[in-house]
Amino acid sequence: MKAMILAAGKGTRIRPITFTIPKPLIPILQKPVMEFLVELLRQHGFDQIMVNVSHLADEIENYFRDGQRFGVQIAYSFEGRIMEGKLVGEAIGSAGGMKRIQDFSPFFDDTFVVLCGDALIDLDLTAAVKWHKEKGAIATVVMKTVPKEEVCSYGVVVTDEAGRIKAFQEKPKVEEALSTNINTGIYIFEPEVFDYIPSGVEYDIGSQLFPKLVEMKAPFYAVPMDFQWVDIGKVPDYWHAIRSVLLGEVKNVAIPGHEVAPGVYAGLNVAVNWDKVEIAGPVYIGGMTRIEDGAKIIGPTMIGPNCWVCKGATVDNSIIFEYSRLGPGVRLVDKLVFGRYCVDKTGATIDVQAAALDWLITDARQDPPSQPPLERQAIAELLGHDGG
């Protein structure tokens, strides 16, 4: 069976990570989120997968290639062009991306599934497709029910008693929401849906195709299903996803490495004197990471591979990407460290290099920076540094 993964977005809401990592490759404890989606599709018999790519397209293609090692076949539809020798992404919208593939050659010749490439899900796709076919739908949206106070963060779907879609509300106020069922970005289509999508223009599934299907009174349905759906569309979402995995709340996602102490997992060859550091799980520490004596790590925390946590440093409820060096005495609470950026859990970002804070946080592959004593106390408070 055939499927499509939408992977052409720039991921602007989860910057700075997506400056260098395309959103589908953002790691959930070292494993890209899109890999979980490919595995789910394969489990339900979807072994022919189209992926539209644009932003950092070569990163995605070089990782997944033709899908052989994942037990599927994968092909890519690039949206963009080459300018001055560089690939420049020009995404044409989710529906536009589907239409481009179909116009190239009619690949989608039977019921097919479309997934957004930025969520962890454990959906029973087989059951969803069965429901879709029983309804005789041309398109079906898989919904999830959320608490009423959360509807303002999502696209709300309004249906009649038979499940036919009547309207959409994009991030409505709580008191104005007509439903607590939200659009999860998981869709089931029949090839006839392409009759409603124009060729050669930018066209979006949610904001353009779906209202048109409602307007044309097409057989357009939505089904509420009970499944785990962990979105990583924004930095706070990603934060929540990593915490949930470490706390064991996400099914089908195991913590890698080996458990060296209760709730503490480590990759290969971590350099640490376990009796000279304070660690409270759940914590994951990647391979070839150095933790100096006197460091304190409080979970839920992920420290990526090849990091260097210096003496007296504290890492509390934080996510540290690979090759990060945390200077002596630095205190990171509720922070995400990615390259030269330090992000709090609301998404506010500090460029540590531009702010002359690279004596606090830098690349572990560089020579350790000097620590300017006059500047140290004045600017340390930005990151909650204890000055020690």
Image: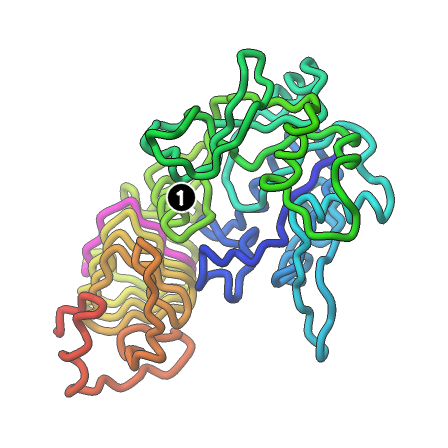
Task: Measuring from the top left, give residue 188's x and y in whole percent.
Answer: 66, 29
Comparing 352 with 74, the one in front is 352
User: Which amino acid type corresponds to the residue marked 1 in the rendered image?
Assistant: Ala
Q: Residue at x 71, y 48 (%)?
A: 97
Q: Residue at x 59, y 54 (%)?
A: 9
Comparing 214 with 260, the one in front is 214
Q: Which colour scheme appears in the figure? A: rainbow
Q: Residues within 10 Å of mark 1 (few under 14, many from 20)?
A: many
Question: Residue 339 appears in which quarter of the rendering?
Answer: bottom left
Vertical side of 189 occupied by 374: above or below: below
Task: Measuring from the top left, give residue 302's x and y in whole percent.
Answer: 35, 53
Is residue 281 shown left or right of residue 256? left
Magenta-colored stretch includes residue 130: no
Q: Which residues are magenta?
A: 276-287
Q: Residue at x 26, y 55 (%)?
A: 334
Magenta-colored stretch includes residue 279: yes
Q: Which corner quadrant holds the C terminus?
A: bottom left
Question: Residue 2 appears in which quarter of the rendering?
Answer: top right
Task: Measuring from the top left, give residue 272's x and y in whole percent.
Answer: 29, 62
Task: Measuring from the top left, give residue 40's x and y in whole percent.
Answer: 60, 34
Comparing 113 with 143, the one in front is 143
Comparing 232 with 264, the one in front is 232
Q: Which residue is disc 1 drawn over?
A: 241
